[in-house]
Image (cartoon, coloured by chain):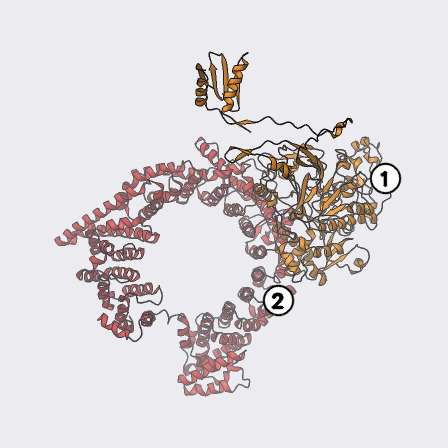
Amino acid sequence: MKLYCLSGHPTLPCNVLKFKSTTVMLDCGLDTTSVLNFLPLPLVHSPRLSKLPGWVSKDGSLNLEKELKECAGRVFVDSQPEFCLPERELLDLSTIDVILISNYHCMMALPYITEHTGFTGTVYATEPTLQIGRLLMEELVNFMERVPKAQSATCWKNKEIQRMLPGPLKDAVDVWTWKRCYSMQEVNSALSKVQLVGYSQKVELFGAVQVSPLSSGYSLGSSNWIIQSHHEKVSYVSGSSLLTTHPQPMDQSSLKNSDVLILTGLTQMPTANPDGMLGEFCSNLAMTIRAGGNVLVPCYSSGVIYDLLECLYQFIESANLGTTPFYFISPVANSSLEFSQIFAEWLCHNKQTKVYLPEPPFPHAELIQTNKLKHYPSIHGDFSSEFRQPCVVFTGHPSLRFGDVVHFMELWGKSSLNTVIFTGNYHTDFSFSAEFINQSNLILKLILFDLIFLSELNFHQVSKLLKEVQPLHVVCPEQYTQPPLTQSHRSDLMLELQPPPMPYRRCSVLNLPFRRRYERVYILPELANSLVPSEVKPGVSVATVSAVLQSKDNKHTLQSVPKAPPVAPSKKRKRVMEEPPMTMAPKPLLSGAVPLEAFLATLQKHGITEVKVEETADGHILHLQAEDTLIQLEEDGTHIVCDNNEPLRATLRDLVLRFLQKL
Amino acid sequence: MDSQCVSILPRVCGVLLVSGSSLPDDTSLEKLLDWFTTVAQTGPSLLEACPCLVDFVSKVAFNYASGSSILSFTLKLTGLIGASEDGFKVLKECSVLKLVFNPQHWQEAGLWEDPCLRIGWIQGLKMILQHSEALSFFAQADLIEPLLQLQTDPSLFVASAANQTLAQVLLLCQSLSSVGHNGSKNRDLEHNSVSMETTQNYSGIITKVSEYLNKSVVLKEISQLPGSQQILRLLAMLLVRVGPPLRDTLLLAVMNSLEELVTTSCSQLTVPLLDVILAANSGLRDDCVPKQRLIRLLWAMLNMKKPDDVMQAAAAVLRSHQSDPALSAHSARVLLLPLDIVTGVSLLDENSTEGELRILITEQLKRKSCISMICVCLSNIPQITLMASDRLPCPQRLIVTAVLLLLRLCCVDSSSSSPGCVEVVRFITGNSKVQKCALEALLVLSKSPGVKMVLVEVFKVLTEYLNSPSSDPSVLQKSYQVVIKWVGVCPDLSCITDQLREGFIQAVRKRACDTRWEARDSTVEFLGHLVEVPSCWTFTEQETEPLDVLLGGRRFTVPLLKEALQDPESYVRASSISALAQTLAPSWQDGTALTQEQEDIVAQLQEVLFQDSEGFARRAAVKYFTAWFSACSSPSSCWLLMQSMPTVLSQGVADLDWEVKLHTLELAELLLDRAFPDPSPSHSYAVMSDQDHRLPIAGQQSDLLSSLKNLVDWGVVSALLCGVVDCDRPVALKACQLLLKLRGIVCPVMDNAADTRVFCQLAGASVLQQVRKIQEIGKDTHVVSEACSEADEEGICASVDPECVGVCEVLRLLDLDEKLSILTQSSDHIYNSPLSLLQDILTAAAASSPPGQDSRQELVMDCY
């Protein structure tokens, strides 16, 4: 059993598991941090961005003015943003049989895998995952295609040139593999390969293994996966949450008794408690609005935003924010808000019961009804006529490099009254965004929250979970095996297990540390009927089997040996292929032990009197002095050592056999 | 005593005698006993007042069939009767005493098993042990044995009462023997022989007690642990209460056992054992031998193997302020060890004697139980700072540094690390218990000398806590307190840079918008308290207010507080109103001109009074006006204040919440005092009520008249008249007192001046009706002088407006004195009277007796 790790990103995993002749890809997350090296794509002409100076090396020898721009001491690529894909050289992606998707954030690289690699397999995902994943992909494509950029910068990727660039461009890895965003056509094609599954539904893969999604509590339709054969069980835990937010709660008990547990999607900001952070989000928001500033919340168009809106729903009245407009701007804003209301069966119990009242499960419906929350596909059109300040805007993309958020950054960046509140996993994803703001002469206030952790397990929860489910081995990204860089003294912010977890990084190939020891084999009824078991000790019966083993589709069956047909009288030459297997009666098997006293008595009866008994660690050695013969009686064998006296040996053998049972 | 009570007491005794007769409730007997106790304490003697009790006691004593509660009651009652020497004699004569206090008697009856009876026995015994006669009886009956047995009774109540009684026995021995010694010269031979005998009794008792204590202090097996704890507690109590000779005797008796106990080092006994040693130690002279042994014991306890025990011992030593300097210095070192280890700040120089303890504590700190150890350390820092500086293991400045570092380690968002114990971080990070203890320590450390230089550090840490999303509201509150404290003691705040201030302002602003009301409440309170911190000096020698230095002054706080007036949580609204009063108080005192902002606030507060659904906010609003009025040097010149008064008073006194009404009346009192400034006006006016003084009175009359008119205009009189008929007793009482005061001032002077009638409007029909009703009653029941009655008639009826009443007339007509006497009695005075209790017992008995029988008759028969 092997695990190929195609992504080093702890929360956007992409791993391939080879298990019992199947090749299963677990998630295909798209690492979007690469876009942080690119200049933002403004929706409206931005004088600030267009006036940025081109980059020329200090000695003037290298001039990449057209491709690279300098902003506040850092160099950015002026081109359509590109993404860092999962590793494609580590194994032949066309051999992948199935792809299991655990949530909509972890499928954004799907078109890169299913298209143009020769992939012919099936993708399994739950319905909300597919639908919301489609929305996110649509949004991404829309963001990119809305602002087409003719230029595609490639010169800087030249190894020689890259080496001379300032960091962090210099240190970017595999820049040649970075790809532009896929097209809608590719998205549609990729998603057409998805087969829908429900929680706990069992899907057979070639008869070899069974895969089954479990609720993970992370987002609508999010799942962990169980991959099991009859005797082995591998659990794959991706984004999961034990908190009570909107999705169905996490199914922990089904993860029990795993041989290997692959653990990804832990929060990297495990210190803060969620209530505190949500409270902090609200109080910062209220504080800014009261002071007359605007609040910008860069976020994905599905997921945590539902919880934020729910939290604000309760907070708006109590904080006297009733008159403040809340805007949600995304090409898929409408669909996202509406989809959330229709997947009732995937919601937590509380929300499910609301549906029967009937009431919309999420309170944002009421916010929309009362005109407190308004949503628009883009800043163009209706929005521009209804826009009122001070206000709160939720919009994407959280990287601040494309999407409507770029416009608001340009608009509000120059006043310190305004606040941008990051709700993403900034420790890993968007710390550069934060830096970018700090360095871009933008003076708006920046607040970083890991609200994405709302839906991620933290280390304390994980240790509890692991204590509960007790897997034999744990595999996890290497980031989880050491404390975060910023808090190196916090030894509690890492996984400490016994045996220690197996860490992986991008391009690791792990031999998972367990051997398959058993295989299930079926016996046909007539064959079973013919068996004659004999009891070797109370409760244990044994029978010998002579049969033909047939293996097909990873199923093994024992069939009776066909009787040899009577030899045809014809003298035609027999065809070798049709010859039935030879049947030979098996040698009988012996069992039992030779009792020393009784054996000595028998020997004496047969005239062997001079016996010297020597006790050994395993049994006894009988020295027949007159015959110069040794009999070694041991627990698992009896040896008769007797030179050139076959009659004596045969006699002695028969005497020993008297004490043993035959099967 | 009430004669009625005396007359029915025999019947009550009769009821009690009949076993099985039910009592109104299970506290009746206790109440009865309380009443007897009062009678015994106040009257001449209990038996004189209630002679039937002896009979009752003797009947019960011979009648086992009475319920255990009655028996227990009787035992206690016997003790109460026997507490006086006369009563004791009577009881002795009718030979009740021996019977009642003989445990054998109860054991034979099979009643001793009942803890209820045992407790009655003990308490009765304790009550009786007041005089030498009783002690002789105690010694002769050899009651010390059963009493000692009860010391470790399975019933905690019995054991504790037995402890108390034993202490009582010893104290009595002590007081009697000292009397015996001093007074022996003046006594005759007979007395001397008695005293000789008694002294023997005493020494016998003391020897027995000493032997008992010595024997039972030592812990033989773990099952005796509760008993041992009990004995140690008893010993500690005795050592505190008894005087030198007896104390030394006891101490010498148990010393060996104590030493043995220390060596067994049982954790559960550490605290009681320490209490004993420290109690013994506190009163001894330094040079006496037991003192040296005790000090050795304390050292032994400070060197035990379990770090928790050692910490507890050190804390106890420090708290007891005992005099051995080496011991307290060592204790301080022990207590500071965890802080030293966790933070890595070397508070203690390397000392080989603590090496082993350091290792043990370091091990302990790697476990979750480290929290309690660190908290013990932190909560004892105040004691450590009280020590003389030459005995401190390190300068206090270093302790502050260590506490600050610890606070940083505890803060979730902090990335600071320490050179100290790394393993502990996972337990203390985000632990609000440790955070609070550390902040508390920091609060105390603000007083330390030479720590002003770390103000910036303190300020940074506190800002970090105020900023942290994971700070618990209670931690935030504590942080605010620490800010106030430190800012209050630091004379120079110039070290607070603009950047620090900006960070702090942001944090406060954010907390004012917090989702948790507790956090908002603390913030608002902080804004109010900060105004009251005394001014400080900047480096340019300018006087500045801390509020200006930290938050940029009222410009910042007033808008925040005004926002908080709209808060959904009533506590926050109330706090913001109080904070606004605190914030604006200085400008009221200075008489600065009102701003538009203040006018807005007044409008908002009136709205609160009218519309707020919660009492807290409305109470605060009334107090705001009270504060304003009392701070104002000349309220009459403040038009807005005086203009608001009628509204505030009329609304406040009609509130649903009695506290709002009471606060409103307090405001009315202020106005009343301001209108008639003489502290004892009634006296000066009272002597001049005759016609002889008509001329001078004329001048006073006009003054009074204008003041009274003012009061009426402000709405004070109508508020008082509303209040006096209020259904809430405290409100009516206050209003009544104020009206009496007003009557004392006004009526004597205005009596005969028909032309100076002042009318007052009464809002609310019900109030008017009630006043009218009282007026009617007044007319019927009181003899009114001819001269006045006409005026009254006119005063009440002549007013054109039916809602108007004449002030003086009403004041005279209302029978305020009678009303006051009714109101001053507690509302349950009738139900709690002894008579009511006795009647209740009789009624309950009658109800439970079988029908068709005249139970009362029978009971009387039985009793007499």
Residue at the image position 46 percent from the left and 73 percent from the top: B732
Across and down, in percent, residue B449 comes to 50, 43
Question: Which residue lies at the image location 77% right of the left edge and 59% below the top edge?
Answer: A387
Residue under circle 1?
A66
Name the kind of residue labelled 1 in the image. Answer: Lys
Q: Extreme left residue here?
A: B189
Q: Residue at x 58, y 36 (%)?
A: A497
Q: Colour of chain B?
A: red
Above or below residue B487? Residue B36 is below
| Mark 2 closeness class: few <14, some 14–19, many ≥20 residues within 10 Å | some
Residue B362 got which mark?
Answer: none
In the rendered structure, the answer to whether residue A105 lies left or right of residue B521 reads right
Asked whether, in this view, residue A86 is left or right of residue B214, the answer is right
Residue on which disc 2 sits: B604
Residue B216 x/y as whole percent: 30, 43
* Chain under disc 2: B
Which of the two residues, A260 or B675, is positioned nearer the viewer here?
A260
